[in-house]
Amino acid sequence: MTSDDDPFHDRELDPEAVLGTHTFEDVLFTDETETPVNVLTGETPAHSQATVEEAKEFAASIDTETPQIARPASVESQVETQSKPYTAAAFFHFKATGSLQRHRAYHAAYEADAFVVDFEADYASGDLTITVGRADEA
């Protein structure tokens, strides 16, 4: 196999690092996601009030070929930019998978015909489960 045929030729991790099923806990937007509170009123600002359904719809509305998940936005960004308490990201985003190396490996597998990649976003628990298999074994 030449480097042009190997989707992992320039990745830090090999396919074995992502093959199988891996669950990443507490990486999705949930009803329990932290939101800022106005110290004067004790209330959550209107821009930081959101439901899981709203966050899921937002992630699904992103116009890209890569499926998106709804991730929690930091309290700091919610305050500084008056943004919603969620943001959208590719399902293999490094903040969800825990490292840039894993992000790149999942991305390579997702883009390659040699692998089958599936994911499940459980917004009740905040857990993301990604499953990668070899296409010739599926």
Image: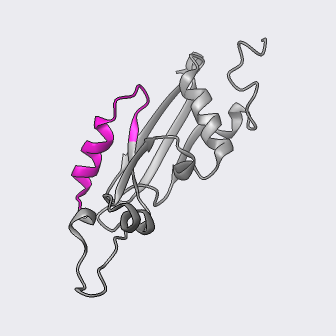
Q: Residue most toward the bottom?
A: 40
Left or right: 91 in relation to 109: left
Q: Nearer the viewer, residue 80 or 102?
A: 80
| Residue depicted at 33% across the width and 60% down the height | 85
| Residue depicted at 59% across the width and 38% down the height | 20
Q: Position of residue 30 (x, y in %)?
A: 33, 60
Q: Is residue 115 visible?
A: no
* Residue interval drawn in magenta: 50-68
Q: Splitting the image into 4 quarters, where does residue 36 fall?
A: bottom left
Q: Splitting the image into 4 quarters, where does residue 19 fall?
A: top right
Q: Splitting the image into 4 quarters, where does residue 88 fall?
A: top left
138 to 18, vertically: above or below: above
Task: Reply yes or no: does residue 66 show up in magenta.
Answer: yes
| Residue depicted at 75% across the width and 28% down the height | 10
Q: Residue most toward the front?
A: 80
Left or right: 46 in relation to 93: left
Q: Position of residue 86 (x, y in %)?
A: 35, 55
122 to 79, vertically: above or below: above
Q: Position of residue 133 (x, y in %)?
A: 57, 28
25 to 106, vertically: above or below: below
121 to 82, vertically: above or below: above
Q: Residue most toward the right?
A: 2
Q: Position of residue 74 (x, y in %)?
A: 44, 64
Color style of the picture: one colour
Say how many tags the image has.
0
Q: Is residue 113 visible?
A: yes
Task: Reply yes or no: does residue 22 show up in magenta.
Answer: no
